Amino acid sequence: TANLSTNPRLHKEIKLAEKLGYHVSYVAFRQGGWSDEKDQSLIEDLAARPFYLSALRKPYWPWFFGTLMSLVCQWLWPFFPENLWIAAVAHNKRTFHILTFLRSNKQCYDLVIGHNLGALYPAFVFSSKLKTPFAFDIEDYHPGESSAVPIKGEVERRKFLLSSILPHASYYSYASPMIGQHVGDLLHPSLFARKFLVNNSFSQGEFVPPEPPTDKLKMVWFSQNINYGRGLEWLLPMLDRFKHDIQLVLIGLLNPGFYEEHLSGRKYIQLVAPMSPSALNASLSQYDVGLALELNTTDLNRQICLTNKIWSYLQAGLYILATDTPAQQLFMSEHPSRGLVVAQNIDSIHEAIEKILSTKDQIRRELNYRYEKGKESSWEVESVKLQQTWREILHA
C-alpha cells in the first residue's frame, strides 16, 4: 500500500529476489510528493516489473469508488464482523484498488508476498486464485498503531485480519522481537505458521567509512516527515542549553507549521530535504550521534518497533542516543557500548548530552570500531533467512 521510497523493506526484498535469479513484479502506489520522484530513480535500477496504482484524486472515479467502498464497509462491518472482504476494505481503501487491479492481472506467480496490512487480504485472495503460496511481512504492529482520526472498530478489524489470514501463510516475517511476540499472541497456538525475525538493517554497501567532524558535536535525526509527535518538540528546548556546542541536522519533508513553531530561530539546526534510503545511509558518515526518539506515549507500536533509523545509525557506526521504549532498551542491551538509553524526561536527556559532550573525543576515536562492528548486522547477513525460506518454498 506504499511504494519503494517509503518502504525500504519492500525494496530490499525485490533486490534480493532479483539477485537470486527470480523474476519479480510488484504493485505499489503513486502518493504524490517527494516519494514519487525518488521511486522513479529506484525503478530504473531494478529489473522488476512495476505496477503503480494511484492513491490520489486523479483519476477521480477510481479514487471516489475506493473511498466510497471503504466508508460503506466501515458501516457494514458491525453487521458482518466475520467477513474478510468487508473488514479489509474498511481498514484501507487502497485494499479495494489492489483487489480491483489483481482481478485483471493474468500473470502467474510462484509466490505472493504482502507488505503493509492493506495488502494482506489481496495477497491471500490472489494466491488462492493462483493456487500458489503467499507470505506477509509485518514491519509494524498494526493493531497498536494510532490513527489521526480514530475509526470505530478499527483495532478489532486489524486483529481479525491478522488472526484470520496469517495461519494460511507459508510464512510471515516481522521487524522486531516484540512485534513478533504481539502478533503471535493473536494466533491460536495450534495454528502453524512459519515465522521469523527480519531486522530492518541495510546492505553494508550503502554505508561509507566514517569521517568524524572536527569541531562541534554533530547530531542527526531523520524521518519521512519533520513534524509534530516525533519527539522533537520535547527534545529541542533542552538542546537549546547546548546550542554553542552542538549542531543538529534534521532530514525529511518539513511541515511548515512545525518549522514556524519549533525550528525557526534555532540556528544550531540544519534542515535537509528527503533522500533515497541509500543516499541517506551514505550521508551518515559525517555525524557523531544518531537520535532515536521514540515515545511510549505515542502508541503501542512505537513502544515495540525498531525503526529503520536505529539500524542505520548502528551500521554507520554512530553513537546512538535512544529513548527507553521497551524495544529500544532490548536493542541497546544486545548492542552494548554502542550508545546510551535515556528516560523520556528532561533531566535524563540533559545528563546524557552532558556525558556525550564530555566524552566526545572518545566517541570519535571509537567510531571506526563501531562501524566495523555494525557489519555484523548487515542486510547481507539478515537476508539469509529469506533466501533459505524462499528456496524451501519454491523448490520443494
Image (cartoon, rainbow, N blue to C red):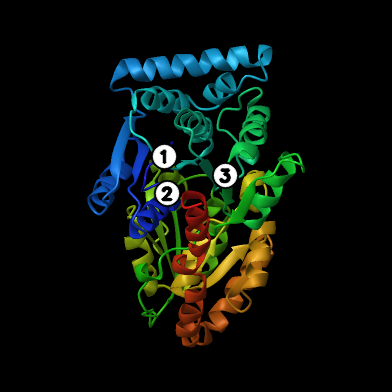
- Of marks 3 and 2, the one in the foreground: 3
Name the element at disc 3. Answer: loop
Nearest the viewer among 149 and 67 is 67
Image-based side of 107 in relation to 311, left or right:
left
Mark 1 or mark 3, earlier in chain: 1
Image-based side of 341 in relation to 394, left or right:
right
Q: Is residue 356 above or below residue 192?
A: below
Nearest the viewer among 85 and 169 is 169
Circle 2: residue type = Leu
Circle 3: residue type = Ser
Q: Are marks 1 and 2 in contact (CB under 8 Å)?
A: yes
Residue with the mark numbered 2: 10
How far separated are the C-alphas under marks 1 and 3?
23 Å
Mark 3 or mark 2, earlier in chain: 2
Disc 3 crowd rating (10 Å Cα; few below 14, some 14-19, many 20+) is many
Please state the horizontal and vertical placement of residue 232, each as a whole percent of the image.
Answer: 52, 54
Please state the horizontal and vertical placement of residue 46, each as a whole percent of the image.
Answer: 27, 52
Name the element at disc 1. Answer: loop
Please state the horizontal and vertical placement of residue 202, each as a whole percent of the image.
Answer: 44, 63
Q: Is residue 175 above or below residue 131?
A: below
Tell which residue pokes out farthest to the front in this image: 396
Circle 1: residue type = Ala
- Of marks 1 and 3, the one in the foreground: 3
Residue with the mark numbered 1: 2
Residue with the mark numbered 3: 170
Mark 1 or mark 2, earlier in chain: 1
Say whether residue 9 is visible: yes
Disc 2 crowd rating (10 Å Cα; few below 14, some 14-19, many 20+) is many
Nearest the viewer among 267 and 155 is 155
Q: Quadrant for residue 73, please give it.
A: top right
Disc 1 crowd rating (10 Å Cα; few below 14, some 14-19, many 20+) is many
